[in-house]
């Protein structure tokens, strides 16, 4: 090998290793960030659970998803557990259960999908279930008009297994490269006939998720499925390289681009500062510590949990509305029945059930 070839090979090794910087484009791959909560019961429709992970659900089956401490080794603290609570033994054509992450186009663009230079990429993960058999992982564009599915097997019940799947790059199809959805990654748990029938390891122009070999995890309420350590990276080399760990603080900041929940530590917490517009209205500016993907939808817990502080008194909030929210923040309007405050004001906690939720999910 020439010196130039040796240097080129060394550069490839460094690029493909941890030294080369961030490789994993999956967020919250260790299921450690859980702003919405740690348990989600009787899921019957598309529902976000631990951060960035959504259960796509349709049909009679129901499950509970929890942030579980059952893990494959001591490098992980959590997994996501799907616990079947209502069986679906007679599948309708449109039945589907899939544990899914949607990835922004400006992130998945590094794969070059939809171009002549599309790259192969690898998905690796730890998985466990009491139900053995063939499962599928599907990669789809936002419309579902282009997709590829690969099979993996759970061969030993109640045993963690590490899986590595390499997908070819799609040189056709349309893939977003902006802040809208580029691709979605789907761990299929059940698929009706509208969503199965795919040819394994082949890009196709259909909306299916799975091959005909996909098991039905939901055929018994004793069934459960766990996953953690999910990694998606360019190239076909992931199986020989260790999982990319990021700090909890970095993972939380990355997740807050899509969902941000403000909850009080105690009753002295203030959510936002502002001023009194008049004797009963306070205007409060909320600035995000992490800019969100897009202008978020805003929701609040019951307004009775909030208060408006100003001057020497605290006034219960009777109504909350929002105005002009973009990805950097916006204005919250809090109404109270009476107020003696005439100077600066803060939107504060009336009790610890107060919560502001900002959602910019894909």
Image (cartoon, rainbow, N blue to C red):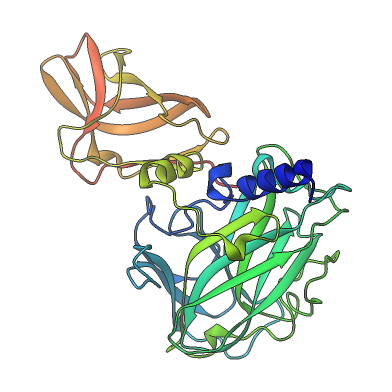
Q: Is residue 280 left or right of residue 119?
A: left
Task: Pick whichever, 357 or 121, lies toward us.
Answer: 121
Task: Pick whichever, 320 or 67, lies toward us.
Answer: 67
Q: Position of residue 241 (x, y in %)?
A: 56, 60
Q: Position of residue 265 (x, y in %)?
A: 20, 41
Evaluate whether residue 204 shows in this view. Answer: yes
Q: Is residue 217 left or right of residue 351?
A: right
**Residue sitting at 37 percent across and 70 percent down?**
73
Task: Pick whichever, 7 or 41, lies toward us.
Answer: 7
Q: Position of residue 170 (x, y in %)?
A: 82, 57
**Residue sitting at 70 percent across and 61 percent down?**
236
**Residue sitting at 33 percent across and 13 percent down?**
277
Q: Position of residue 166 (x, y in %)?
A: 70, 66
Q: Is residue 305 left or right of residue 65?
A: left
Task: Pick whichever, 28 or 271, lies toward us.
Answer: 28
Vertical position of residue 324 compared to residue 213: above or below: above
Vertical position of residue 330 compared to residue 24: above or below: above
Vertical position of residue 331 compared to residue 88: above or below: above
Vertical position of residue 320 compared to residue 338: above or below: below
Residue closest to the far left: 312
């Amino acid at each position: 090998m020439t010196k130039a070839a040796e240097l080129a090979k060394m550069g490839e090794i460094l690029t493909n290793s941890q030294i080369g910087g961030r490789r994993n484009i999956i967020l919250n791959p260790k299921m450690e960030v859980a702003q919405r909560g740690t348990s989600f019961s009787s899921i019957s429709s598309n529902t976000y659970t631990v951060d960035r992970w959504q259960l796509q659900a349709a049909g009679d089956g129901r499950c509970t998803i929890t942030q579980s401490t059952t893990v494959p080794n001591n490098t992980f603290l959590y997994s996501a557990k799907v616990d079947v609570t209502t069986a679906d033994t007679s599948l309708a054509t449109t039945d589907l259960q899939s544990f899914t992450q949607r990835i922004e186009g400006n992130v998945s663009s590094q794969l070059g999908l939809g171009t002549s230079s599309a790259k192969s990429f690898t998905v690796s993960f730890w998985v466990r279930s009491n139900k053995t058999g063939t499962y599928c992982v599907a990669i789809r564009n936002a419309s579902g008009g282009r997709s590829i599915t690969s099979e993996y097997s759970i061969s030993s019940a109640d045993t963690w297994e590490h899986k590595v799947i390499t997908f070819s790059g799609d040189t056709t199809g349309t893939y977003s490269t902006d802040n809208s959805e580029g691709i979605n990654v789907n761990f299929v748990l059940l698929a009706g006939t509208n969503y199965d029938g795919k040819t394994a390891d082949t890009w196709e122009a259909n909306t299916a998720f799975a091959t005909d070999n996909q098991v039905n995890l939901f055929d018994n309420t004793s069934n459960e499925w766990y996953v953690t350590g999910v990694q998606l990276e360019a190239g076909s080399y992931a199986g020989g390289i260790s999982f990319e760990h990021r700090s909890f603080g970095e993972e939380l900041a990355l997740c807050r681009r899509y969902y941000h929940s403000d909850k009080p530590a105690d009753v002295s917490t203030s959510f936002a500062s502002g001023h009194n517009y008049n004797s009963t209205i306070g205007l409060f500016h909320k600035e995000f510590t992490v800019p969100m993907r897009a202008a978020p939808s805003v929701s609040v817990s019951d307004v009775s949990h909030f208060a408006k502080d100003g001057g020497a008194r605290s006034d219960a909030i009777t109504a909350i509305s929002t105005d002009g929210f973009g990805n950097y923040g916006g204005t919250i309007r809090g109404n109270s029945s009476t107020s003696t405050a005439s100077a600066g004001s803060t939107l504060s906690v009336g009790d610890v059930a107060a919560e502001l939720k900002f959602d910019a999910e894909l």
